[in-house]
Image (tube, rainbow, N blue to C red):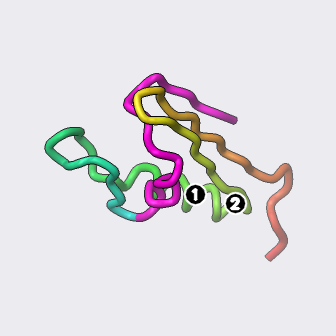
Amino acid sequence: MSVTDNGIGFNQADADKMFTIFGRLHPREAYRGSGTGRTICQKIANAHGGYISAEGAPGKGATFRCFLPLEQPAE
C-alpha cells in the first residue's frame, strides 16, 4: 500500500530521521505535530513482520509505502 501527497516533502537523506520518536525535520513553529505518528506506524508494521519506506523531495511531496507479509511470522 502507498500514500502520496503534494506537501512540503523532505530531503531523501533525512528519510531515516522521520521514523525516530519525536523526529522532526522542521521547527515546531513551522508545522504542527509531535513527530510520533510515523514512528507508531513503523512499530506496528515491524510488529507484523513488515516495514514502511519513505520517498520525497523538498517542495514536491512524499510517498510512504507500507509492506506487510501475507502471513505472520512464526513465533
The tag on residue 32 is none
Decide which of 19, 36 is in the foreground and name it.
Answer: 19
- Report the residue at 71% width, 57% height from top: 50
Decide which of 14, 40 is in the foreground and name it.
Answer: 14
Tag 1: amino acid: Ile
Q: Is residue 14 magenta?
A: yes
Label 1 sits on residue: 44
Q: Which residues are magenta?
A: 1-20
Classify mark 1: residues with Cα within 10 Å, few (<14), some (14-19) or many (20+). some
Check disc 2 and report its element: helix, strand or loop.
Answer: loop
Tag 2: amino acid: His
Q: Position of residue 29 (x, y in %)?
A: 14, 43
Q: Are marks 1 and 2 in contact (CB under 8 Å)?
A: yes
> Residue extending furthest left?
29
Label 2 sits on residue: 48
- Report the residue at 85% width, 49% height from top: 70
Disc 1 to disc 2, C-alpha distance: 7 Å
- Report the residue at 38% width, 31% height from top: 8
Q: Position of residue 13 (x, y in %)?
A: 51, 54
